[in-house]
Amino acid sequence: MHDNSTSARTVGFLLGLIGSDDAERVRRRIRLPGSDADEGENNRSVLYAAWKQLALPSSVLLWALEEDDPERNAVVWGHKSADDAMRRAVVRGVPHGPGRARSVRVEKELRREPEPPVPQHFSRYGLIGALRASTSMGPARTAASMVVGRPGWEAVAAADRERALPGYARWALAVRPDCPAALRIQFGSHAKFTHRARQAGVIDGPARYATTWSPANRVLIVLSMGLTMFPTRVREAEDALRPLVRKHLGDREDAWAVVAQLAGTYHGTVPELLMTAGAIA
């Protein structure tokens, strides 16, 4: 296999799902490089810089925010895919973890950053008024970006129960990764709606990301960095993949060698990669 840190990171994440003794033996036998990936894992500034350049579904950024850690929040704020709603929440210290209400400290370098601009129709009509006045997707998105934290979502849910919000507003709210699941259900379901949510990068948890998104190599890179960026949620992905790794690869060195060879160019999902490698071996 090629000696590069990408292979070490992707295959290394999977090796973490079997026993440590077997993992070390397999690593030695297939000559899996470790130095570059280990350095990136231990040097957070290196990992943070790499993380900011990854193309990430919006839900992955949310999982990092759910750690309610000032350092991780600053990394999310600087990510190219972070939207105004996320940046607004970060600079306001809004907590995202389940059941948390205490404000999150804002890193010193972000205290000087201005909050994303307030939409004109929000200043004029307020949150619910701006959502109800949204007759196209652009205004709906900007109005939806002003929903901040649990109180904001509760106000939106109450307003929609009182009188259904316009379709554009519902759409813009539902494709935010932090939209509460109960509110999405309240908005209703439709095949096109589900497709739009997926296009927006909204994922029903790390387990689903690990088992249904592709390509496998990119997913595994994100999950390997997730050990640092969203350690609380990454366990869900590990639990989903562990039985598949044991079933298709186990401690078989030949199967692991095939995974290392295929991972970089494989276009399918992680489960498909594991099954294919096991069958070839």
Image (cartoon, rainbow, N blue to C red):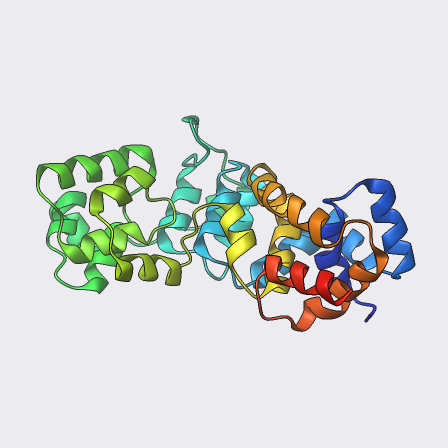
Question: Can residue 101 be seen by looking at this rendering?
Answer: yes
Report the front residue among 119 and 192.
192
Position of 263 relative to 63 (above/below): below
Q: Residue at x 21, y 57 (%)?
A: 140
| Image quarter hosting the C terminus | bottom right
Residue that extends furthest to the front in the rendered view of this protein: 279
Residue that appears at 85% across and 45% down: 22
Residue name at image x 83 percent, y 54 percent: 252
Quadrant position of residue 33: bottom right
Above or below, comparing residue 68 to residue 132 in the picture: above
> Residue shown at 83%/41% (left/top)?
20
The image shows residue 120 at horizontal and vertical percentages of 18, 55
Relative depth, front residue between 36 and 237 = 237
Q: Position of residue 270 (x, y in %)?
A: 61, 59
Quadrant location of the N terminus in the rendered image: bottom right
Is 242 situated above or below 95?
A: below
- Report the number of discs: 0
On the image, the x and y values in percent for residue 129 come to: 12, 46
